[in-house]
Image (cartoon, rainbow, N blue to C red):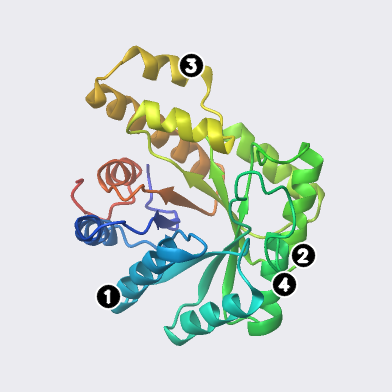
Amino acid sequence: MDTANKETPAISFELFPPKTEKGMEKLKTVVGELKALKPEYFSVTYGAGGSTQERTFATVDWLREQNIDTAPHLSCIGTDRDDILEILKHYQAQGIRRIVALRGDLPSGSGLGGLGELNFANELVALIRHSFGDDFHIEVAAYPEFHPQAENAHQDLDNFKRKVESGAHGAITQYFYNADAYWHFLDDCKQLDIEIPIVPGIMPITNYSSLARFSDACGAEIPRWIRKRLESYGDDLGSIQEFGTEVVTKLCQQLLDGGAPGLHFYTMNQSGSVMQICSALGLADGAAAA
């Protein structure tokens, strides 16, 4: 990638809060390695209630202690309005200026409704904007291949537009492996006068079986030719990772060449593949691949 006459695109990384002390120590190492890539921020996923939520807070606290720009995820399903506001006040006091505002996963068998005072992401966005003005830069989720629970494509786009109209500043997409899905989604958004930056979400390929299960659950399509190649490698993780890095690097290059405003990597708390991809794209700034 020739970056001599191009502005370096913004990159960011998603982390999940570790469940154990050993996991946290590993995360600290991973963050130290990924920091060398000079990301705009790290985001941290969120689980409503209980120990999962506390692990999110602990991870965010550690990142802020390192003076790392951090964007906590915040979901509204099953959480009271006052609790959400208290969390946001805490983040504001920490100097956090970016929030990823999400509906959150529905509990099994819950249907829609009766899960708290706020049941949709646009309601959460509106609450943040009403209560804090522009103190937080609000990112929301976008689905180029459409949310698996949406009845149809039009409904999904309308839901996305509501989040934007409620005050979202930007969006991060679910991961995908077909660049055309992203471009078509941008075209659809343009038709609806949606003009916020929409950053592609990027999932490195390191383990086929876990990726396939996760993709089936979240509605992200793995193109047949990629599935067949990955299946042919069986348990050969080295070949899976080599092929996966090649595929994802080419996807990222297509997206950047086409004008994507940046890349948001779903790291799964791993640094190796991300650093290899960024190095191949010329985004590593001299950092050695892990």
- Indicate the secondary structure of the residue bearing disc 2: helix
Gap in angstroms between the C-alphas marked 4 and 1: 31 Å
**Residue 169 found in image quarter:** bottom right
Q: Which percent across, then down, holds residue 266?
A: 42, 48
Above or below: residue 155 compared with residue 77? above
User: Which label sits on residue 165?
Assistant: 2
Left or right: 148, with 177 as reference point: right
- Indicate the secondary structure of the residue bearing disc 4: helix
User: Which label sits on residue 225?
Assistant: 3
At 54% across and 79% down in the image, what residue appears?
88
Q: Kindly check if marks 2 and 1 are in contact, taking CB atoms under 8 A apart as contact.
A: no
Three-letter residue code for mark 3: Trp
Gap in angstroms between the C-alphas marked 4 and 2: 9 Å
* Within-10-Å neighbours for mark 1: few <14, some 14–19, many 20+: few
Gap in angstroms between the C-alphas marked 3 and 1: 42 Å
> Reading the chain from its start, which is encountered first: label 4 or label 1?
1
- Indicate the secondary structure of the residue bearing disc 1: loop
Gap in angstroms between the C-alphas marked 2 and 1: 34 Å
